[in-house]
Image (cartoon, rainbow, N blue to C red):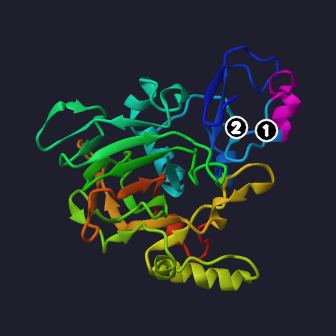
């Protein structure tokens, strides 16, 4: 059973709690306490799942590194009650490659028979719109090259990436993609990225409005010092909290502790990786649903660019104010 899959179990179970079809969702986060009492979702503990369905779950890893298994017993409902009581009070995290349905429906994503990466035609100023493969991903100039990178073994056993794959843009790039729709509210927008000597300096825009100062994605000690990355080792909780506040003041966060990289004895939380960062793009941002959506733009502003610099995005976070600005219940590290 692959991580990241959603499997519908159509055989009715005799157990009274499961008279209807069941959805097995290998999601990437553990639901909050609120989800366990949700009116439209039945969430079982993994121990109970094993006892209820031993013949089905006996050979399934119930505690994979980057996934959890949850059973739901009803169709998910998306309405005003859901939004006000649940959705706008949860941190939302996407792998950006999941935001472009053309990549999944055309077997580009997760297809390991087509090589390490796939070039994604994305249009450009002088290129016909027919060359734009994904409706929600587009180039703004002809110097932009966009690629999908599949999970790949490296010296660290794998890319330091959520779900293993990534969005990679090269050249004197200027590109944008549409953010997922979210309910009206006040949010913080973040991206995850991996520092590398191949990266450059990027300027972010949201709906063509500039977002703060440029972000240096290059991996060197000077840049790490500017960002303020720190190791948790030998620090007290109070010291860790102080260091995290200092990073946020610079516009950065450590990677989530709930995502793991490596295998076996080498498996570590991504939070422990010094080249994995979260960049805060915008905060206290009021978003309203619109027909055209909201677009995140990235532009190469590397000084004396030779057009070989990379932009890397691992994941996207859209976080409601009730999560990132709640002194009584600070955001967790996952």
Determine the residue positioned at 31% across, 34% down: 134
Q: Which residue is mark 2?
A: 70
- Whole-percent x and y of residue 168? 40, 49
Position of residue 20 measured from the top left corner of the image (x, y, whole percent): 68, 19
Quarter of the figure with residue 38: top right
**Horizontal side of residue 202 vs 317, given as left or right:** left
Q: Where is residue 279? Give x, y as percent.
A: 44, 66
Which quarter of the rendered picture does the C terminus lie within? bottom right
Q: Can residue 203 be found in the magenta stretch?
A: no
- The residue at which mark 1 appears reads as 62
Quadrant location of the N terminus?
top right
Q: Taking the image as drawn, is residue 333 in sight?
A: no
How many callouts does the rendering have?
Answer: 2
Q: Position of residue 182 (x, y in %)?
A: 39, 49
| Numbered disc 2: secondary structure | strand
Residue 46 image label: none
Q: Main secondary structure of the magenta part?
A: helix
**Which residues are the magenta region?**
47-59
Residue 50 belongs to the span the image colors magenta: yes
Judging depth in this view, the residue of 136 and 326 nearest the camera is 136
Which badge, 1 or 2, is on the more N-terminal residue? 1
């Amino acid at each position: 059973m692959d991580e990241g899959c959603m499997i519908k179990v159509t055989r009715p179970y005799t157990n009274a709690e499961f008279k209807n079809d069941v959805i097995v969702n290998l999601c990437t986060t553990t639901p909050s306490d609120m989800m366990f009492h949700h009116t439209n979702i039945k969430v079982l503990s993994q121990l109970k799942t094993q006892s209820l369905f031993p013949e089905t779950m006996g050979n399934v890893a119930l505690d994979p590194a980057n996934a959890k298994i949850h059973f739901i017993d009803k169709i998910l409902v998306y309405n005003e009650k859901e939004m006000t009581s649940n959705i706008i009070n949860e941190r939302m995290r996407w792998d950006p490659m999941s935001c472009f349905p053309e990549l999944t429906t055309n077997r580009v994503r997760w297809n390991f028979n087509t090589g390490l990466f796939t070039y994604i035609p994305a249009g450009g100023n002088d290129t016909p719109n027919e060359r734009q493969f994904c409706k929600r991903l587009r180039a703004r100039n002809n110097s932009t090259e966009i690629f999908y990178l599949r999970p790949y073994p490296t010296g660290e056993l794998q890319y330091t990436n959520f779900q293993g794959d990534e969005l990679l843009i090269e050249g004197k790039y200027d590109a944008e993609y549409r953010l997922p729709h979210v309910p009206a509210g006040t949010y913080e927008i973040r991206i995850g990225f991996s520092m590398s000597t191949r990266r450059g300096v990027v300027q972010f825009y949201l709906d063509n409005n500039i977002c703060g100062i440029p972000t240096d994605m290059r991996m060197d000690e000077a840049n790490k010092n500017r960002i303020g990355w720190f190791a948790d080792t030998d620090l007290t909780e109070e010291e860790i909290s102080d260091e995290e506040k200092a990073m946020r003041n610079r516009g950065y966060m450590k990677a989530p502790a709930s995502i793991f990289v490596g295998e076996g004895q080498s498996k570590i939380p991504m939070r422990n990786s010094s080249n994995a960062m979260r960049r805060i793009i915008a905060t206290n941002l009021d978003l309203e649903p619109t027909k055209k959506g909201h677009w995140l733009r990235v532009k190469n502003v590397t000084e004396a660019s030779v057009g070989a610099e990379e932009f890397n995005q691992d994941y996207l976070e859209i976080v409601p104010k009730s999560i990132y600005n709640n002194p009584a219940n600070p955001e967790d590290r996952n």
